[in-house]
Amino acid sequence: MQANLRVLRAIIAVRARAGEFVLTASPARPARLSCALQKDLIYGKSMLTGSCLCGAVAYEVDAEPAPFVHCHCQTCRKTHGSAFSSVMPVPRAAFRWVRGDELLAAFESSPGKFRRFCTRCGSHIMAERIAQPNVLLRMGCLDTPVAGPARAHIWRSDAASWYDPKDATPELPEAAASPPPAR
């Protein structure tokens, strides 16, 4: 029950930020959602939403979050300019573009695998193999909060030499004005 309440609160927060509805409250009259709105939020069409950096491209997925992985293959590293890419498979039948699909471009990074990205901001949004039942969401583009941790780090045999997921690098809540002190 508590997990359902956390998910509902996360969905409400995301949709309220998107301007889908406004909650008003006072000490005498706490904010309440109608039963219909609660049902829509819990069982509605969109369990996951995502968008690119500029917001021109967006998608919805009618599915629960799936276990995800951090992929360290060279193609993912180069596509994202990062040590790895966090990837979540979702059913193709549950995935749909809701905005900006005309702004998408695709790059065939390996035979049959297409990486789709926004032509305005360059965000890599998803990848797919046309004959496969799932598409691969790039989790950095998710707008819906998703609980972790990842199921696994994959393609560690291809990982960047400069990154070790087990190191004890200091973690900072935001950018530091200067580098942290040496260990």
Image: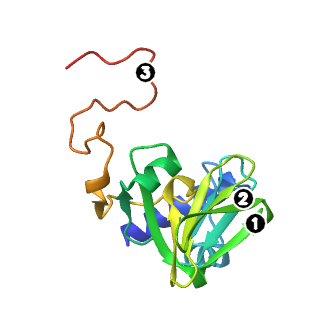
* x and y, in percent, of residue 11 in the image: 56, 63
Quarter containing the C terminus: top left
Q: Amino acid at mark 2?
A: Val
* x and y, in percent, of residue 133 in the image: 51, 85
Label disc, if present, on residue 101 of the rendered structure: 1
Q: Residue at x 60, y 48 (%)?
A: 27
**Residue at the extreme front:** 111
Q: Quick one: label 1, few (<14), some, or many (20+) residues within 10 Å?
A: some
> In the image, which is nearer the foreground, mark 3 or mark 1?
1
* x and y, in percent, of residue 24 in the image: 69, 53
Task: Assess whether mark 1 and mark 2 are in contact (beta carbons under 8 angstroms).
Answer: yes
- CA gap between label 3 and label 1 equals 37 Å
State which tag comes first along the sequence, 3 or 1.
1
Q: Is residue 84 visible?
A: yes
Label disc, if present, on residue 57 of the rendered structure: 2
Nearer to us in this view, 3 or 96: 96
Quarter containing the N terminus: bottom left
- CA gap between label 2 and label 1 equals 6 Å
Task: Assess whether mark 1 and mark 3 are in contact (beta carbons under 8 angstroms).
Answer: no
Q: Residue at x 31, y 59 (%)?
A: 155
Q: Is residue 30 visible?
A: no
Nearer to us in this view, 6 or 82: 82
State which tag comes first along the sequence, 3 or 2.
2
Q: Quick one: label 3, few (<14), some, or many (20+) residues within 10 Å?
A: few
Q: Which residue, given by chain and number where applicable, does mark 3 sit on?
A: 176
Quick check: 167 above or below 158? Answer: above
Disc tally is 3
Quick check: 85 above or below 42? Answer: above
Q: Residue at x 27, y 15 (%)?
A: 181
